[in-house]
Amino acid sequence: MPKSVSVVVISYRRSSNLERILQAWLAQTNDVWLCDCGLDFKADLPVKIARFHPDPGNKARHAIALLTDGDYVIKADDDLLPKPGLIKDFIDNWDRSGGGILGLHGRKFNGEIYYKNTTVFKASCINKLAEVDFVGICTFTSRGNLVFDFKGCESAIEDLFWQMKAYPSVRKWVIPTKNFADLPECFDKGCLFYNNQAREIRENFYKEYYLKNYKR
């Protein structure tokens, strides 16, 4: 039986390329959802849109993922453009890996400091599946890995919260693929990656759960 895949894109006031991103996902699946946390997106597309006010942060993507109908769900940022074949790449590598949580960007944990003691893997720079401890940016998984309690799930750590606290024992993989493009928005100086307060929150959460679940 063919595997059905849903896509959830979360966006906060990054509407300039959003229609193009959604169209690219729609070319690969007909079940695409948008978490519009900035309330500024307008387009005539067959996309299911959930608008939030006030903005609940990045945990909104996890909540909306539970409303989808796909056997598998992709959760994607609004600074990534999928190219033809990306969903197929995820499905093919799911079968090769045996399952878990797959992504296009990942880290292997080597110590208790997130930004210094982790090794980074990127899908476009590898030629075979890489097992890691965390994946992000764009993730693919089955419905069984979607359900968890969002209490305490802050925007700065929502992906770590999902994978380190809720599902630490699920295997994580970066897949080899070049079927995506990073858009200029990923270098936006206002994003959480460059926010010092968010980085501190992330470091503290990572250290706690690294020592609890991952220290080797």
Image (cartoon, rainbow, N blue to C red):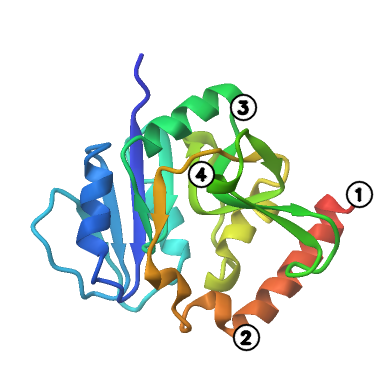
* Mark 2 residue crowding within 10 angstroms, few (<14) / some (14–19) / many (20+): few
Which of the two discs, 4 and 1, sits closer to the camera? 1
Q: Secondary structure at mark 1?
A: loop
First reached walking from the N terminus: tag 4 or tag 3: 3
Q: Which mark is residue 197?
A: 2
Q: Residue at x 55, y 46 (%)?
A: 123
Q: Position of residue 172 (x, y in %)?
A: 65, 41
> What is the distance, in whole Å, between disc 2 and disc 4 at their CAs?
27 Å
Q: Which residue is mark 3?
A: 97
Q: Do the residues under discs 3 and 1 have CB atoms within 8 angstroms?
A: no
Quick one: 207 or 79, which is closer to the camera? 79
First reached walking from the N terminus: tag 4 or tag 1: 4
Quick one: 215 or 95, which is closer to the camera? 95
Q: Which residue is mark 4?
A: 146
Q: Residue at x 39, y 30 (%)?
A: 88
Q: Which mark is residue 216?
A: 1
Give the residue type that dot 2 points to.
Answer: Gln
Give the residue type that dot 4 points to.
Answer: Leu
* Mark 1 residue crowding within 10 angstroms, few (<14) / some (14–19) / many (20+): few
